[in-house]
């Protein structure tokens, strides 16, 4: 691995999608607004009618003809028969409703259906790579090819794969940086407010911090349009740099990046 003061990039970010003002999802992403006092599943809300955001390829009729390699075949959670096992293996505990459908651990999302591989919990891994020292620090982010935001180079954990293995694989696939020999600090296991989440399908992530003495060459590939080292002394500084470059920080990753900063800045 070569050390360098700049990152290389191979891709083009000219045609990025427009994002909502919070940098969370594409503009016009459908969904019902959920007031904070109605988020909790225990609060009765009989009129609640979340928007179905299931993409065409995961609709029941499409699944009957063809199941994409990245998705499970069940057209609804009722056709999933191992909820006991899935709940026991979950990174973040979740409940089932009276129909036996899984419920988002953080409550109502305003969206229903499935825009992820599995019903219920979908496990991801997020490697946060920081370089430098307290004088000057950097973080390696990718430009996501789905919503065009600057994000941690993470991805879904493959079936049978461990989270630590997924951290290494995703980082290598999306940036070319191979940290298989490094031991990261696990920062947490959390629900990520991913723009694809619904009431019945969501993402949890194992986030981990890698600390390097200096920046290394990163080359975007796979789901990444670009791979860039950004200044990382604070979230404000990162935000300013990303915005000045005409890009947007992925809102769902802000808590993970803040936790990494808290760890890096602890005395
Ligand atoms: C985020 O999407 C997760 O935190 C992770 O970074 C990523 C996983 O989805 P894919 O990149 O595999 O689509 O919510």
Image (cartoon, helix red, strand yellow):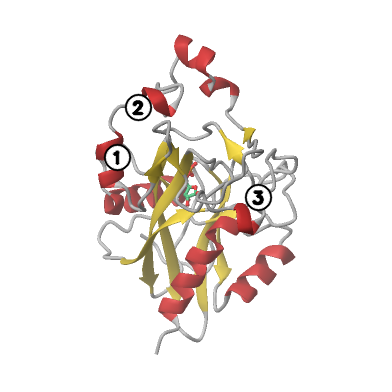
Horizontal side, residue 145 vs residue 260: left or right: right
The residue under the point 63% across, 75% down is 237
Residue at coordinates 63% horizontally, 44% vertically from top-left? 147
Q: Secondary structure at mark 2?
A: loop
167 relative to 64, above or below: below
- Residue 172 appears in the figure: yes
Q: Position of residue 125 (x, y in %)?
A: 38, 52
Question: SS for tag 1?
Answer: helix
- Residue picked out by circle 3: 34
Q: Earlier in the sequence, mark 2 or mark 1?
A: 2
Percent x, y of residue 257: 50, 67
Residue shown at the point (53%, 59%) measured from the top left: 253
Regarding residue 176, the answer to whether it shows in the image is no
Find disc 2 in the rendering and name its residue. 80
Q: Position of residue 141 (x, y in %)?
A: 53, 58
Mark 3 neighbour class, 10 Å CA radius: few under 14, some 14 to 19, many 20 or more: some
Q: Disc number at residue 86? A: 1
Q: Quadrant of the N terminus?
A: bottom left
Q: Earlier in the sequence, mark 3 or mark 2?
A: 3
Q: Is residue 61 left or right of residue 31?
A: left
Are dots 2 and 1 in contact, CB under 8 Å?
yes
């Amino acid at each position: 691995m070569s050390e360098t003061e700049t990152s290389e990039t191979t891709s083009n970010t000219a045609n990025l999608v427009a994002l909502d003002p919070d940098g969370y999802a594409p503009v016009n992403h459908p969904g019902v607004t959920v007031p904070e006092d109605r988020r909790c599943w225990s609060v009765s809300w009989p009129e609640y009618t979340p928007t179905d955001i299931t993409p065409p390829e995961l609709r029941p009729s499409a699944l009957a003809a063809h199941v994409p390699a990245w998705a499970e075949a069940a057209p609804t959670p009722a056709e999933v028969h191992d909820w006991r096992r899935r709940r026991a293996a979950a990174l973040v505990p979740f409940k089932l409703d009276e129909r036996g459908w899984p419920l988002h651990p953080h409550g109502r999302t305003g969206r229903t259906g499935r825009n992820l591989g599995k019903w219920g919990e979908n496990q991801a891994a997020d490697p946060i790579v920081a370089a430098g020292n307290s004088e000057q620090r950097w973080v390696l982010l990718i430009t996501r090819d789905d919503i065009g935001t600057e994000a941690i180079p993470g991805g879904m954990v493959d079936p049978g794969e461990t989270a630590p293995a997924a951290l290494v694989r995703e980082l290598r696939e999306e940036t070319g940086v191979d940290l298989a020999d490094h031991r990261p600090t696990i920062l947490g296991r959390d629900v990520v407010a991913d723009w694809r989440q619904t009431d019945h399908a969501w993402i949890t992530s194992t986030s981990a911090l890698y600390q390097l003495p200096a920046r290394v060459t990163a080359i975007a590939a796979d789901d990444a349009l670009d791979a860039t080292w950004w200044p990382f002394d604070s979230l404000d500084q990162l935000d300013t740099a990303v915005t000045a470059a005409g890009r947007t920080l992925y809102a769902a990753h802000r808590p993970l990046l803040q936790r990494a900063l808290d760890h890096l800045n602890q005395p």
